[in-house]
Image (tube, helix red, strand yellow):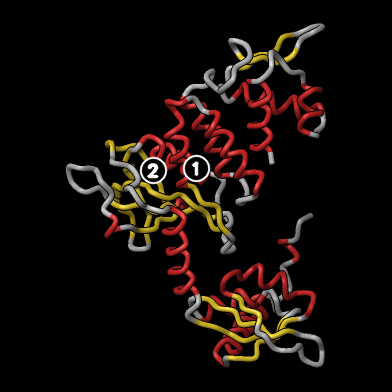
Amino acid sequence: MRADRLIQALLLLQGRQQITAAQLAEELEVSVPTARRDLEALSMAGVPIYPTRGRGGGWRLVGGARTDLTGLTEGEVTSLLIGLAQSATAEPERIAAVRKLVSAAPAPFRESAQRIADATVRDAPWGDVSDAGEAQTVAELQKAIARNRCVDLEYAGSRGPSSVTLVPLVVGSRGARWYVLGAPPVAESGRADLERLRTYRVDRIRAIELGRPSDGIPSGFDAREEWARMVDRVEGLRGTVQATIRVEPWAVRALCDRFGAQARLLDTAPDAEGRSTVTVGAHRTDALAEQLAGWTAAIEVIAPQEVRTALRELGERIAAAYSDPVDEGLRPG
């Protein structure tokens, strides 16, 4: 993971007078061109490192070797931690890298760095695919958390656009889709009103600005516990319609991964053809049929009849849409 490598490269630099791309490549077990690109990426991100040319040259931190990351500004520490916190899932290597960066950050910045680490959650997928532009909005939310600031949002909700002011408390993802858990500030104090805690989809945030100071994350607020509670609530809404299906042996794991918490492998013996029985859920019958349509070569819906009917009707619409031959004049030359 590149974010992990950048942190490791920075920690190596702060402990040595200088390092060459070849030495860094050996330490990180990557190619020399990859190591060189990582060093250049650190420099372009504003980290105070510079190359020296010629025999005996290499890369150095401005001011020489350090025992901590005192050569970095608060913005630079925040930017590095945001990139790392947004990357991949909660793998042990990423968690270790976050801890190293927080502990190595200069003391005045350590508290804000810890806030970002505590308030960012990477979670299992719900199957949505996000726009790459979400990363910048997520970064702005993480900066607000680090600085104990409210945010002013232009939000395109299901009931139309609105202006929202809130204290961001948790930034998390399910797969590629990002969400923010936040609450409006109590008048005057800036304290988050936890009775009005809500979940917002980051891809629906059309504009974001840092607002007035807040009291930050309330004492005793557990980001991961609140995130888990939100996930359970949403999963409950998503699973109001369930279907029982038989699944070919080779597709069981892939299907269960795709449906996540909405799939449950029943504790029954495989049928005569080796197929397993699984229940899957969604928030509506038509939505469940659309999700299952792509698995028709690997599954058979046993019940309920409503889902079977929805699948048949979906197939009829697809067949009707593609029943006529394509106009030859529209074919590419």
Q: What's the CA distance linking mark 1 and mark 2?
A: 24 Å
User: To which residue does mark 1 refer?
Assistant: 117
Q: Position of residue 138 (x, y in %)?
A: 47, 44
Category of crowding for the residue at label 2, using alpha-carbon neighbours closer than 10 angstroms: few (below 14), some (14–19), many (at least 20):
few
Q: Residue furthest left?
A: 188
Category of crowding for the residue at label 1, using alpha-carbon neighbours closer than 10 angstroms: few (below 14), some (14–19), many (at least 20):
many
- Quadrant location of residue 60? top right
Q: Secondary structure at mark 1?
A: helix
Could you tell me which residue is drawn at 73 percent across and 62 percent down? Answer: 329
User: To which residue does mark 2 refer?
Assistant: 207
- Compared with 323, 270 (above or below) is below
Q: Position of residue 101 (x, y in %)?
A: 56, 33
**In front: 240, or 288?**
240
For the C terminus, which image quadrant? bottom right
Could you tell me which residue is drawn at 29 percent across and 56 percent down? Answer: 194
- Compared with 259, 156 (above or below) is above
Side of 36 where 229 appears, left or right: left
- Mark 1 residue type: Ala
Q: Position of residue 103 (x, y in %)?
A: 53, 32
Q: Position of residue 174 (x, y in %)?
A: 54, 58
Q: Secondary structure at mark 2?
A: strand
Side of 172 where 36 appears, left or right: right
- Mark 2 residue type: Ala
Side of 50 where 251 appears, left or right: right
Could you tell me which residue is drawn at 73 percent across and 74 percent down? Answer: 325
Could you tell me which residue is drawn at 28 percent across and 36 percent down? Answer: 213
